[in-house]
Structure formats: C-alpha cells, structure tokens
Image (cartoon, rainbow, N blue to C red):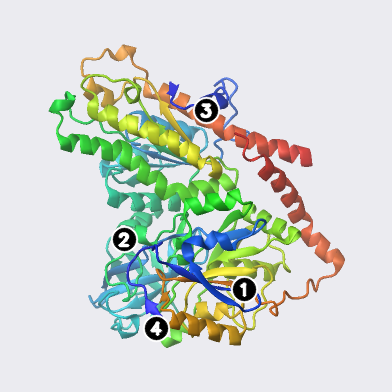
Amino acid sequence: MIAARLPVQRPSNAKVLIVDDQGNIEHQARSEFAGLLRPGDVVVANDAATLPASLSGQHSRTGRRIEVRLAGRDSLDEIKQFSAVVFGEGDFRTPTENRSKPPALKHGDRVELGPLRGTVIRFLNHPRFILLQFEGSLREIWEGLARHGRPIQYAHVPTPLAVWDTWTPIAGRPVAFEPPSAGFVLDWRMLASMSARKIRFGTITHAAGLSSTGDPELDALLPFAEPYRIPRSTALMIKHAQASRGRIIAIGTTVVRALEHTAAMFDGVVPPGERLATQRLDASSRLRIVDAILSGTHERGTSHYELLRAFVDDETIGRIDQELNARDYRTHEFGDSVFLERAANKTRPRPSRLSPHHRMCQLKHYVTFCERECLCGLLRNDG
Amino acid sequence: MNIHHKTVESIPSPLSPLLAPANDHPCNPFTDIRVAITGGTSGLGLSLVRELLDRGAKVAFVARSRDGVERVEQGLPAAHGIVGDVSRKEDIHPITMQIVGALGGVDVLINNASDLGPIPLQLLADTECEDLERALATNFLGPFRLTKAMLGSLAASARECRGAVVVNVSSDAAVNAYQRWGAYSASKAALLHLSRIWDEELSLEGVRVLSIDPGDMDTPLHAAAVPDADRSTLKSPEVAARELADTIAAVLSRRRRTNAIVQEAIG
C-alpha cells in the first residue's frame, strides 16, 4: 500500500474495498459508500473531535526539549490527568521509531509545555509512558491545550496538520487523541441521503487513542484503555435494529470496540452510558453487535488490523492484503477504506448465560427506557 | 424584537415572566442546557450571559479582550470565559474546543459578536475595503465557521432531544437599506440569508437556526454608530436579553413538552 500524504478527508478518487459475508471482494468509489447500505441499517460513527494532543516544551529538571503526546484518560470529563508518551527533541517529521529519547524521567518531574505546567505522578509500566497531572484551573488547561497543542501526526504527512484537518464533519466533544478517521468519509449530504432511505444514523463518543508510539513494547499494549459514551438515541437505534434484523454498521474501529465492550458487559444488550473500553479485539473475538465495518486500510501487525480479523477469516484477510497492494490502495488516516461484512462463519455467540429471571431483571429498566425513547423519536420532528 | 424567520409562527409565544418556572423547576427549559455566546463582555452579549445563568443554563462566552473576559468571570464565576476572535479563522477551532470541552457539548449557540464597520459610519463609496472585510469576517464568516465547527455537537444535542438552536443576532439593517450603514447592513443581510438556508437544510438534523433582531438597544455598538442618539428611546440590553431568552425557551420547551407527554403516556 501507499501512504496517503495529503490531509484531504474526502479525495475525489478515494476508493473502498468491499468484502461481503461470503468473502467475495469488490471495489468501488468511496463516495458511493452509502449505496452499500440497506433500509433498516443503523450506521454508528464516533463523533469525538480530536484534541491537539502533541505538546512541545521542556523537561524542567534538565532543561531539555521534549514532546509529550497525550494518550489516554480515565473518563471523558477528565481534563487534569492524562496518560502520555514522552519523546525527546524533534517532531513528527522524524518517524516515531527513530525519535530521540527524552531525558530519564523521575517521579515528580515537572514539564513546561507552552503555557501548561504538569507533573509526572506515575509511570505506567514503561519509562516513557507516564501519568501526567496538569496544574491550574479548568479554563487555563482548556485554553492551554487549545492554543498550544498541535495535532498528533506522523512522518508520512510531511506538512503540519491544522486542527480542522483532524476533525470529522460530525466532530463534537474534543476527547480523541488521534482522529477517528474512518468518519472522514461522512458529509452532511451523505447523512441526508441515508435518512431519505430509512437508514438511521447514530453516534458514540469514544476517546480514540494513539495508533503508534514507535516503541515495540508500548505498541504491544495498544490500544490503551479508552473511555466512551453511548447516548440514549444510539442505544435505542441499536435495539430497534436488533429487533428488526437491521444491520449495525460501524464507522471505524473505535465504534466496534465501544459497542462490543458494552455488549460483553450486558450480555449482548447495549444500554446507554459511559464506560472504559479495555479489551483488545482480534481473530478470536466473537462479535455480538456489529455486522459490518467501514475502516481505513491497516497494516499487518497493528491493533487496528487485528480488529479487522474479527470480521473475516485468515484466508480472506490474506486476499484483502493482496488486493490492497495490487491495486495501490492508500493507507493511514487520509487513505482509502475497506468495508467488511462479518463473515457468515463468524456467527454471533450463544445468548445469555444468565437465568431467564436474572436476564429479565437486568433488562427491565432498559426496556422501559427504550419504549419511552421510541415514542420520543417518533415525535421528535414536531416542527 | 423581530424574528427574521419564515417559520416564526411555529414558535409559541414567549412565556410570561410571571408564569415562568423557577430555575430549579423541572419544567424550566434552561435547566442543564449548554449555551455558548459570542461577544459576551458587553451590551446584549453580557446581558445574555447574566440572563441565561439566572435561568439555570451552563454558559460559556467568548470575547476578544482577555481583560474583559476576566472581568466578567470575576463577577459571574459560574460562566466559562474564552478569549478569542470569531473573525479569525485560526481562532474558530480553539474557541469551539474550549466551549464544547468545558460544557461537555453545546445545545444553544448565540452568534452575537458584531462589527459595525467603519466608525464613524461611512457612505459605501467611502468605505475602505478593509472595513467591509472586517465586518463580513465578524458578522458573517465568523458565525458560519463557528456554527459549522459546532454542527456535530448541535446535531448530537438534537438526537438527544435536548434542543439544538442557533441564534444569529440580526438587525433591521439586514432588511432595510439605511444610508451609511453599508458594511454592517450588507454583512447582516448575508447572515440573515445564511440563517434561512441553514434552517431549511438542518431541519433534517433537528437543528433550528433563527435570525433575531433585538431592536435598537442602548449598547456600545449603537453609541458608536449614532453618538447623539436619545438613549431614553433605546431598549435596554437587559430587556432585549430577556426577550431573546424567552424565544429560545419557547423552542426548547417544545422538546421538553414532547418528552413530558411521552413519559406521562408511558407512566
């Protein structure tokens, strides 16, 4: 595959490789993606806006230049404490695997990142992976991030990214550390056309983390834990789709991670709420919720690639790799896409290990909520 | 107050202040509603910050002057102040990030910040291009960019039946051709039409876009435009803010009433 080097979210020549549930492969223009959807489908995207999470500055004790890449947080509301990966002097122009190391960090070290001040309060099983606590008021921290931060980027895009390059058209809360780039495909015209065809659109908000650190030990830990929120409207859409045999289409790997994490907690049901996704999905995972995914093209060995293997078997993913390479698909966040239906032999798991009585108690409040929201949805466009 | 909007008839009459629910009443349409106001340190904007805080909303406001923002925050510590200039493209995303980040989303955006154009007012033929550009950047491009950057948040708000309203503060100069008001007038006319088109296009998403003319107010902007005006004939910004808040409340109430009816029906 070829690295996509230009920060264009919807290039006119973008293409999508399509794999149906029998493993058949086709290709088409990505702008026609909505044509792959059917009435009754529910499309779910990640509406997180991307924080400018690359913070340059200096390590106070040594005075050496560093770059801090914010990488995670415990909740979507957290703004004072972040997990972060620390690099030495330099920036995105150097591939992460070749970046210089920061000075040896110690517990209690202070860092000066533009107007932001922070302290290393813990190490997270790696000398460059820290828990960083910012000083100051919420207003000062938000302003510092918004004004000083730069989007995290990698050497394959040679020019500095602007914040707007990294926000999808549906971007809302600024909680992601890298863009949920599968959502670049969406625009408001596409959403309107989907609505006209009775294809429902919902969102989750998922704090997408780093895709690469350049350090094999750290990369092996990816994806880090990521908080996410499933709103009531999306939970309701999913329930309706499940009841009516509509498909649930995930726009991006973060959506799969969030929905499947919740489904695993609630025995195949997706209630609304905020949670922390900690699982890693791979070929051994059995998907309970998501029927198909639109995703970027990913390189073998990455956590995103492993997640795609939950949708297709080894033989099929091998053919996908061959097709992507043979047809010069572009990869990375501004690249082309794949649309994978869950293979017919990747069946949903058997339902409920819970007793019928227990399961009924667990669902009681959720069903009440769904009935109420159903009516709300019907009455929503009240003028 | 005039609402430049063809569907204004669909908006119920504003609630009578005497009948308005208390701020902590569950029927108060502003309870927990997240509001962003530009130009929030003087005139109508400042009055809106006060009025909406009083009504129980979570409020973030934007203004260019750090001193002004800090002064307002000192007096109204519940408000989240943001330093930024909506006429600058580079400021839009940092402003949006701080608003949506601090409030956890946004339900109501009030594009209030305005630029008069040349001061003193000039005939169009005597207006410097730079003055016209500045008025367009503040009064037209700024609201367009800010609304576009917040559209994901607003659409999410609509899906959650929270409200999702954009108010673009307009003027009778948007529809009437007054001599020497050319830069301001043309930019507000563009904003008015933008509001109409966007309201049509975004109805599918459940986002309302209103253009509201609050009337001639006793504000610094009016004083700059008409220095010798009889201030006793002008509406106070506090009254204008109350009227505008009532209009927003009416829109929000429709959603709240729908939810209440549904919940009652289900029991």
The reply to whether dot 3 and dot 2 touch (C-beta < 8 Å) is no
Q: Mark 1 lies on which chain?
A: A
Disc 2: which residue? A162
Q: Which residue is drawn at 51% across and 26% down?
A: B8
Could you tell me the amino acid type at mark 1? Asp
Sequence-first tag of 2 and 4: 4
Q: Along the horizontal axis of the image, is A289 left or right of A5? A: right
> Residue B206 location in percent, x, y?
55, 42
Disc 3: which residue? B7
Discs 4 and 1 carry the same chain letter: yes
Q: Which mark is residue A20?
A: 1
Disc 4: which residue? A127
Could you tell me the amino acid type at mark 3? Thr
Tell me the CA gap for discs 1 and 2.
Answer: 36 Å
Could you tell me the amino acid type at mark 4? Pro
Tell me the CA gap for discs 4 and 3.
Answer: 61 Å
The reply to whether dot 2 and dot 4 touch (C-beta < 8 Å) is no
Q: Which chain carries label 2?
A: A
Q: Residues within 10 Å of mark 3 (few under 14, many from 20)?
A: few
> Which quadrant of the view contains residue B240?
top left
Instruction: Judge depth for marks 4 and 3 and give the one in front.
Output: 3
Q: Which mark is residue A168?
A: none
Q: Along the horizontal axis of the image, is A6 left or right of A268? A: left
- Residue B28 visible in image: no
Tell me the CA gap for discs 3 and 1.
Answer: 46 Å
